Image (cartoon, rainbow, N blue to C red):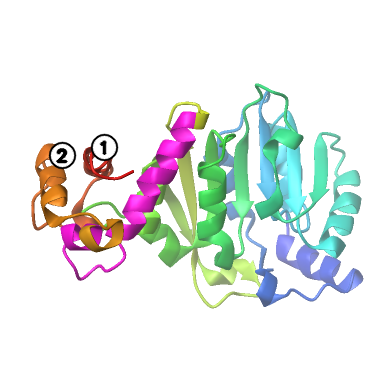
């Protein structure tokens, strides 16, 4: 992938591509970062990877050489067409291009019943949270994700207690996030306004069941209430949001061994699990 910056700009000129900031179209032009993404993804020759936002296909071709199969999901109609041409010229035959919004993508439509998959994604920054919620809470979550994210968002995701946010709790609940490296804005064309980071996440929960998915929904319903007003003590948020008595909340805190004056951001994932379980005695 030598002189990738020049090749990117030339392809955009040939196909009259004008990168749209509204779609998060900032093309990665540093070969070293592509290699870092491949290494972080830890793909095996027998594995399937879903690539989100494949762009001009530079990373797609490398993923195809590392994995059994690549499912490349591209929203932009024009880029999806160009990607088809680019992949045909790369001498790889194990890439399936899906011209679709990733938030409407159902992995089960493209995978065998017991087939695992990994995700590699260069996401528009404005869909990061909903993308993560959609994939991690699904009945068919990926084994791992390697994501290019806004650096500030990646830092928020890996932050644990006592500075937990609802976003970081939502990720840590399912597994372990780790920042692999930061990526300066100058490694993209056109350069975005902020730096980025490569984040790796390994899914550590048991295979989802209908019951566990409902339990997860209840967990996050209560967590959202707990984080609703960060300046308030957690128990006050829960009393108001769950419409139960202060006495009931205090009993739940005692049962879960949570300090009475705790705030939402100070609790670990395990403490949140205990608290939600204790609150189930009082909440339908």
Q: Are marks 2 and 1 in contact (CB under 8 Å)?
A: yes
Residue 245 makes an appearance in the image? yes
Vertical position of residue 29 compared to residue 199: above or below: below
Question: For mark 2, what is the residue?
Answer: 256
The answer to whether residue 93 is left or right of residue 145 is right
Vertical position of residue 73 compared to residue 265: above or below: above
Q: Is residue 218 magenta?
A: yes
Q: Between 239 and 132, which is closer to the camera in this rendering?
A: 239
The answer to whether residue 206 is left or right of residue 270 is right
The quadrant in which residue 25 appears is bottom right
Question: Which residue is found at the position 69% from the left and 42% from the top?
Answer: 106
The disc label shown at residue 277, or none = 1
Q: Position of residue 67 (x, y in %)?
A: 69, 31
For the C terminus, give its image quadrant. Answer: top left
The quadrant in which residue 252 appears is top left
Q: Is residue 235 magenta?
A: yes
Question: Which residue is found at the position 58% from the left and 74% from the top?
Answer: 192
Q: Secondary structure at mark 1?
A: helix
Q: Which residues are magenta?
A: 211-238
The answer to whether residue 279 is left or right of residue 116 is left
Q: Secondary structure at mark 2?
A: helix
The answer to whether residue 99 is left or right of residue 251 is right
Q: Between 115 and 193, which is closer to the camera in this rendering?
A: 115
Q: Between 211 and 6, which is closer to the camera in this rendering?
A: 211
Mark-to-mark CA distance, 2 and 1 = 8 Å
Question: Which residue is found at the position 77% from the left and 65% from the top?
Answer: 8
Q: Position of residue 80 (x, y in %)?
A: 84, 56
User: Which comes before the other along the chain, label 2 or label 1?
Assistant: 2
Residue 147 makes an appearance in the image? no
């Amino acid at each position: 992938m030598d002189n990738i910056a020049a090749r990117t700009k030339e392809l955009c000129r040939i196909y009259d591509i004008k990168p749209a900031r509204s779609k998060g179209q900032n093309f990665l032009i540093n070969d070293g970062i592509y290699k870092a993404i491949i290494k972080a993804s830890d793909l095996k020759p027998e594995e399937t990877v879903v690539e989100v936002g494949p762009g001009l296909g530079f990373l797609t071709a490398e993923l195809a050489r590392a994995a059994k199969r690549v499912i490349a999901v591209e929203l932009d109609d024009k880029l999806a067409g160009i990607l088809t041409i680019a992949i045909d010229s790369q001498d790889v035959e194990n890439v399936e291009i899906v011209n679709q919004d990733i938030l409407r993508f159902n992995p089960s439509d493209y995978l065998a019943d017991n087939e695992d998959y990994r995700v590699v994604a260069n996401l528009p920054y404005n869909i990061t949270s909903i993308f993560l919620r959609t994939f991690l809470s699904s009945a068919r979550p990926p084994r791992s994700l390697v994501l290019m994210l806004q650096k500030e968002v990646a830092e928020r995701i890996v932050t644990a207690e006592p500075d937990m946010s609802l976003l970081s709790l939502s990720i840590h609940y399912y597994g372990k996030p780790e920042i692999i490296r930061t990526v300066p804005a100058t490694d993209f064309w056109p350069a975005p306004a902020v730096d980025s980071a490569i984040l790796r996440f390994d899914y550590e929960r048991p295979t989802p069941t209908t019951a566990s998915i409902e339990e997860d929904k209840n967990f996050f319903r209560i967590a959202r209430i707990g984080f609703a007003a960060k300046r308030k003590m957690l128990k006050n948020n829960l009393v108001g949001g769950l419409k139960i008595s202060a006495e009931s909340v205090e009993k739940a805190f005692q049962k879960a061994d949570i300090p009475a004056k705790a705030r939402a951001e100070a609790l670990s994932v395990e403490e949140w699990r205990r608290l939600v379980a204790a609150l189930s005695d009082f909440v339908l």
